[in-house]
Amino acid sequence: MRAVIQRVSKASITVTEKVTAQIDEGLLILLGIEDADTNEDIAWLSSKIVNLRIFNDENGVMNRSILENNGDIILVSQFTLHASTKKGNRPSYIKASKPEIAIPMYEKMIQQLTNDLGKPIGTGVFGADMKVELINDGPVTIVIDSKNKE
């Protein structure tokens, strides 16, 4: 599982001119799912996300988590995070899970993040053409891969 985590001061997802999710201070997370991902990847990644100390404390130091800041989360499934650009100029998405595997994993991640955050999260619409708007705060952008725990 691969996640691009962006600290935002505002973010929203629009699908066919309808806003499906909107937050102020929090995290916009793009999530790539591959066939090798498991429930352990979901639990590990969700815990890592909600405990990341990337929000400023009273001294302006990134020392607070989204839990401590009572922020919100939007989660968007994005198969292009598993693009392979090794050969040629057209990316291959062979590592990205097909919908029959990705949708249940995405739904489990939504539930895990909701549980770990202690409140509902916003989402995109799986497989839809989405318009993502955000104001990246910082900017702070972190990439985490559950298969490469650095």
Image: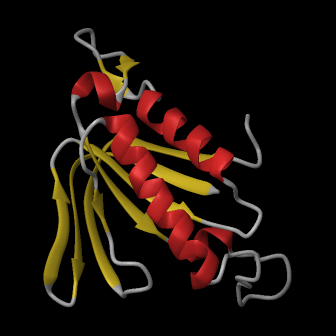
Structure colour scheme: secondary structure
Q: Is residue 131 left or right of residue 83?
A: left
Measured as percent of width and height from the top left, residue 97 is found at 67, 77
Q: Residue at x 63, y 76 (%)?
A: 101
Inspect this view and state whether residue 3 appears. yes
Q: Is residue 30 left or right of residue 119?
A: right
Q: Is residue 104 positioned above or below 141 on the image? A: below
Residue found farthest to the top: 59
Q: Is residue 83 positioned above or below 2 on the image? A: below
* Front residue (pair 85, 65): 65
Q: Residue at x 28, y 15 (%)?
A: 57
* Front residue (pair 149, 126): 126
Q: Is residue 3 left or right of residue 147?
A: left
Quarter of the image for the N terminus: give it: bottom right
Measured as percent of width and height from the top left, residue 126 is found at 41, 79
* Front residue (pair 139, 112): 112
Q: Which picture quadrant has residue 89? A: bottom right
Residue found farthest to the right: 87
Q: Which picture quadrant has residue 117? A: top left
Q: Is residue 80 left or right of residue 95?
A: left
Measured as percent of width and height from the top left, residue 52 is found at 47, 29
Count of numbered badges drawn on the protein: 0
Quarter of the image for the C terminus: give it: top right
Measured as percent of width and height from the top left, residue 137 is found at 29, 42
Q: Is residue 21 positioned above or below 93 on the image? A: above
Inspect this view and state whether residue 145 appears. no
